[in-house]
Amino acid sequence: MAVANSGALVLFGVTGDLAHKMIFPALYAMAKRGTLKVPVIGVAHSKWTLPRLRKRVIDSIQRSGGIDDQRALRHLLSLFTYVDGDYKDGNTFTAIKTALGGARRPAHYLAIPPALFETVIKGLGAANLAKDARVIVEKPFGRDLASARELNHVRAWCSRKIQFSASTTSSEKRRS
């Protein structure tokens, strides 16, 4: 059975190091290949503006290997919108819903500390943003047995609320 494509990428933690070091260069590579065609909604509680976020994206790409395709860069930057808000505030999720517009099956990428996973997922559910959505967790699965068990609890809760997708980064696969 084929899984339907997501109509948008919602990137929680968009102003953080993970986005800067890994996600922006990956999105740029997708833009260069012509495979990134959905809105990217960056979410953080940093009091940033969209122009500041775009500067951060450019800096990230320059540091990771340089910009060799201006058209792809312009395309990538055109896909970004920014929602500033606290993950504990329902208004943040209302703003995300507005930014999503008519996008269906959004992929919610959690580039945030694991302690915030449940807060964000509950916010998505309360704002009716969970229908046909995916949650992608980009973190090691716990730092010890106790935290891994806690994340398993969150994962179980998620599986009842949202299609939960956990991926392993290539660096984690090499360590296995």
Image (cartoon, rainbow, N blue to C red):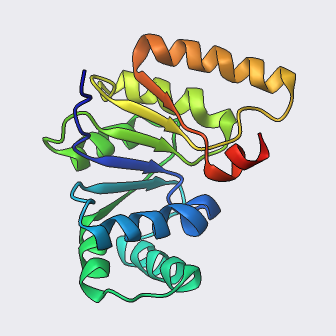
Residue at horizontal 62 percent and vertical 36 percent from the top: 116
Residue 21 shown left or right of residue 131 in the figure: right
Residue 63 shown left or right of residue 71 in the figure: right
The residue nearer to you, when weighing 43 against 135, is: 135
Q: Which of the 4 image quarters holds residue 49? A: bottom left
Q: How many marks?
A: 0
Q: Which of the 4 image quarters holds residue 105? A: top left
**Where is residue 126 drawn, in percent x and y?**
38, 22
Residue at horizontal 73 percent and vertical 49 percent from the top: 174
Residue at horizontal 26 percent and vertical 40 percent from the top: 6
**Where is residue 137 drawn, in percent x and y?**
55, 38
Residue at horizontal 24 percent and vertical 50 percent from the top: 99
Q: Which residue reaches farthest left? A: 102
Q: Quadrant of the C terminus?
A: top right
User: Height in image: 58 above or below 31?
Assistant: below
**Where is residue 17 drawn, in percent x and y?**
64, 64
User: Height in image: 129 above or below 138?
Assistant: above
The residue nearer to you, when weighing 1 against 94, is: 1
Residue 115 shown left or right of residue 93 in the figure: right
**Where is residue 135 drawn, in percent x and y?**
45, 33
Q: Quadrant of the N terminus?
A: top left
User: Height in image: 83 above or below 24?
Assistant: above
